[in-house]
Image (cartoon, helix red, strand yellow):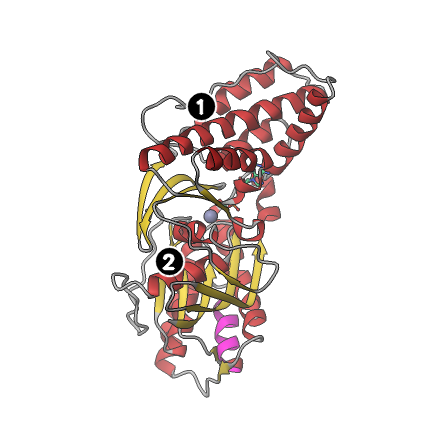
């Protein structure tokens, strides 16, 4: 089914808006065209808090959405809006009353330019930060009311899962990979660490998840103890790479320098736990202070190895248990080169097809929400919401796949 979809993502600290045209052909392949795609990252705004601050995220999403929408809308055919009916204006004003940063701007934008000529609006309804999710949902239903198109509620994790099927996005037109089932996906980001099994296109099952902190969060929190800026993950992996080069040139002996526990690595389930790592890390950092550059590199190396060891051990276990034919990986932490290397190794050992999400779709973005929206809209069991004054779209900050 060929559909043009407007997608909106506001679950955490990235505001994303895009319009995709997706065509599912009879042979089962799914062709995606990115017509327009805009993203505003709030990372810098949250830096001084050392992590995402929900009420700030909410305000910034509201501030970002009208200009992002404008920049996306100007690339597509618009349906003019002769006049917003008084009752619709009242309704939208009520929905947007909690987001004063965007209410008037969005209404003015619609009044002046109309609404994009799309078949549906896909919006993230969870999991994520509830105040942040509400901004996207209220903006989506306001546009849907005027455009008179259905809303497709999207699970953010389905977006991360499906984005692993995208090849490189250097080209705006691509065909999603269709590897064999069952598929296992490791989804690792600042907010999530999950192992998901997909048995058929519309059936997902969560096999395991973190019981406390996410893997990216562990990189960020422990990296912060080393004095690294938020988000610390990329800095930790840079230091770890320097350590690796020095070990190779015999300039650094790291054995017994730092030794972190591998939480739950041998537990007989597929869950994770990274919160305890922080306590162990803090003790070892405090004992070593003031740390030299070499010590910091050695510590980063140990931290990266620890987190990747645990992620890989559990993924390996999931592959064996399910006899998976394909391994997928998504979320911001897939940028980590050591993790990528180890995923390649276990995929090859288990004769699995490996699909790692392209880096520009690994962090939160609207394209993955549009793709997941298309799958949801073409699934008979998904409830697509018809727009109207009582549009019953609801967020669920703990929504599970
Ligand atoms: O998917 P994402 O944007 O997170 C959420 O929105 O939840 O991913 C960001 C996370 C951060 O925790 C960041 O530190 C981590 O991914 N990250 C990395 C690397 N690049 C990003 N962690 C380890 N190594 C990296 N190279
Ligand atoms: Zn995410």
Q: Check the image and name the residue furthest to the bottom.
A: 82
Question: Vertical placement of 288 versus 129: above or below?
Answer: above
Q: Which type of secondary structure does the marked residue at label 1 adopt?
A: helix
Give the dominant element type of the magenta stretch: helix, strand or loop.
helix
Near mark 1 (Cα within 10 A), the count class, few <14, some 14-19 or many ≥20, is: some
Identify the disc placed on residue 154: 2
Q: Check the image and name the residue furthest to the front.
A: 351
Residue 340: percent from left, percent from top: 55, 38
Residue 251: percent from left, percent from top: 74, 18
388 part of magenta stretch: no
Residue 71 visible: yes
In 3D space, how far apart are the residues under numbered discs 2 and 1 (Cα atoms)?
A: 32 Å
Q: Where does ligand 1 appear, by image quarter?
A: top right
- Callout 2 touching callout 1 (CB < 8 Å): no
Q: Give the range drawn in magenta.
A: 102-112
Q: Which quadrant does the N terminus fall into?
A: bottom left
Identify the disc placed on residue 276: 1
Q: Which residue is drawn at 62% across and 47% down?
A: 44
In front of the other: 319 or 217: 319
Question: Vertical placement of 96 versus 204: above or below?
Answer: below
């Amino acid at each position: 089914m060929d559909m043009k979809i407007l997608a909106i993502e506001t679950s955490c600290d990235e505001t994303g808006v895009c319009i995709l045209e997706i065509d599912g052909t009879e042979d089962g392949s799914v062709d995606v065209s990115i017509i327009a795609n805009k993203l505003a990252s709030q990372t810098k705004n949250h830096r001084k808090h050392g992590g995402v601050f929900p009420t700030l995220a909410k305000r910034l999403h509201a501030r970002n959405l009208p200009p992002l929408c404008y920049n996306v809308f100007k690339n597509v055919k618009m349906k003019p809006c002769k006049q917003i009916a008084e009752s619709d204006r009242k309704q939208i004003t009520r929905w947007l009353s909690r987001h004063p940063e965007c209410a008037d701007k969005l209404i003015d934008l619609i009044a002046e330019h109309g609404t994009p000529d799309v078949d549906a609006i896909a919006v993230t309804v969870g999991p994520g930060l509830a105040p942040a999710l509400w901004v996207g949902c209220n903006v989506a239903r306001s546009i849907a009311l005027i455009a008179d198109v259905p809303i497709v509620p999207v699970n953010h994790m389905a977006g991360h899962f499906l984005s692993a099927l995208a090849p490189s996005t250097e080209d705006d037109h691509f065909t999603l990979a269709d590897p064999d089932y069952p598929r296992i996906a490791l989804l690792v980001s600042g907010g999530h660490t999950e192992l998901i099994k997909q048995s058929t296109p519309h059936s997902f099952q969560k096999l395991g998840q973190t019981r406390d902190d996410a893997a990216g969060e562990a990189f960020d929190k422990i990296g912060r103890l080393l004095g690294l800026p938020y988000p610390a993950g990329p800095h930790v992996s840079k230091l770890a790479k320097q350590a690796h080069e020095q070990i190779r040139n015999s300039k650094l002996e790291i054995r017994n320098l730092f030794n972190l526990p591998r939480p739950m690595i041998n537990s007989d389930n597929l869950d994770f736990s990274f919160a305890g790592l922080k306590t162990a890390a803090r003790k070892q950092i405090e004992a070593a202070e003031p740390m030299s550059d070499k010590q910091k590199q050695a510590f980063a190396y140990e931290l990266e190895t620890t987190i990747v060891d645990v992620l890989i051990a559990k993924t390996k276990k999931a592959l064996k248990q399910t006899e998976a034919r394909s391994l997928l990986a998504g979320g911001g932490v897939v940028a980590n080169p050591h993790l990528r290397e180890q995923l390649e190794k276990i995929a090859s050992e288990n004769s699995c097809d490996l699909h790692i999400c392209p880096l520009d779709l690994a962090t939160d973005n609207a394209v993955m929400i549009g793709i997941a929206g298309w799958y949801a809209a073409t699934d008979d069991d998904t409830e697509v919401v018809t727009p109207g004054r009582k549009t019953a779209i609801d967020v669920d900050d703990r929504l599970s796949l």
